[in-house]
Amino acid sequence: MGLTFENRTAVVTGAGRGIGKAIAETLASHGVEVVCVSRTSETCTAVAEGIVQSGGRARAVPVDVGDGAAVQAASEDLLSDYGTIDILVNNAGITRDGLLFRMSDDDWQDVIQTNLTSCFYWVRGLGRSMTRKRWGRIVNISSVAGIAGNAGQTNYAAAKAGMIGLTKSLAREFASRSVTANAVAPGFIKTDMTAAFTGDLADKVLGGIPLKRFGGSLDVANMVAYLCSEEANYVTGQVFTVDGGMVM
Ligand code: NDP
């Protein structure tokens, strides 16, 4: 299916690696000008340079998405440069796994701050330009852990479930301005985040995936691209699992 994008600009967080990199590259391949955000300058710069070398439009902005003041400053800079940011993909995320009784305050707080509170910061920073323009797309990368839960990931699952509540509330708040908000919940996608899952552990996970393979970053990026396109005009407030059928 060809997707339609009308001279759009996008911010993709966590675009330095993995799923975010694939999202940034896929949007750029559709002609979207992409702002690649990651924590370290090296990763987002490399991705933005790769996009430009392939004929796309991109730039790198290193920001810690959990730092509200830094996100606000970056948002203001971007809006003064571009006028509007049309598409926001909140993809940056971390894990700090551990059973609840052994989880430190920092492990809890860091995951909530980086994965969930960051979404609030970015929407606060960029959302008004979308509502003013009466067009916008917000896609939050949640997780199947936010739907089904996962032992050892209470912090992560709470943040990812929180993203779903945030998404649905945004969808309701922004609908009258033709700004949509949706969540994508990946299952097990092969990236640095899941690199430690090998051997018996990986086999056990595979056993629960009807399509009998782990996903690739592009599997998620293709769903995100659709949700950001004109073709998804009538889709808002939804959660789309991209998980090979793991959670039904
Ligand atoms: P990776 O660990 O491969 O990449 C994470 C990216 O997020 C990196 O670019 C990293 O920046 C960036 N990032 C992390 N913390 C911050 C921060 N504080 N500020 C700015 N950028 C930050 O992750 P994945 O690609 O695997 O995951 C992407 C998203 O998808 C996450 O939200 C994750 O929870 C979710 N997800 C992933 C699944 C999987 O199986 N992989 C399954 C379900 C959901 P830097 O490059 O500078 O380190």
Image (cartoon, rainbow, N blue to C red):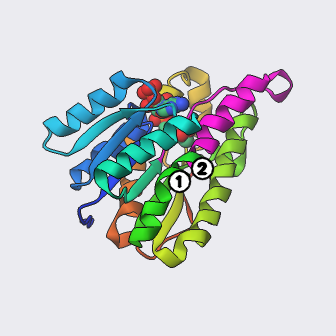
Residue 10: x, y in percent?
35, 52
Q: Are marks 2 and 1 in contact (CB under 8 Å)?
A: yes
- Label placed on residue 77: none
In the rendered structure, which amino acid carries the disc numbered 2? Phe
Q: Mark 1 belongs to which amino acid?
A: Val
Disc 2 crowd, CA 10 A, few/some/many (<14, 14-19, 20+): some
The span picked out in magenta is 90-119
Q: Can you say which quadrant of the picture contains the N terminus? A: bottom left
Left or right, 107 with reference to 138: right
| Relative depth, front residue between 194 and 38 | 38
Q: Say if 169 sits above or below 126 in the image.
A: below
Residue at (55, 53) in percent of width and height: 124
Residue at image coords 43%, 61%: 129
Residue found at the very far right of the displayed protein:
101
Q: Is residue 178 magenta?
A: no
Which residue is tagged 2?
120
- State the residue in front, 157 or 139: 139
Nearest to the observer: residue 198 or residue 174: 174
Q: Is residue 220 above or below residue 169?
A: above
The residue nearer to you, when weighing 117 against 82, is 82
Q: Distance between the residues labelled 2 and 1?
A: 5 Å
Residue identified by numbered label 1: 123
Indicate the position of residue 100 as horizontal and vertical percent values.
82, 29
Residue 98 showing in the rendered view: no
The answer to whether any part of residue 64 appears in the image is yes
Q: How crowded is mark 1: few (under 14 residues within 10 Å), some or many (20 or more)?
A: many
10 over 206 or under it: above or below: below
Badge 1 element: helix
Does the magenta-highlighted stretch encompass residue 110?
Answer: yes
Q: What element carries label 2?
A: helix
In this rendering, position of residue 160 left or right of residue 38: right
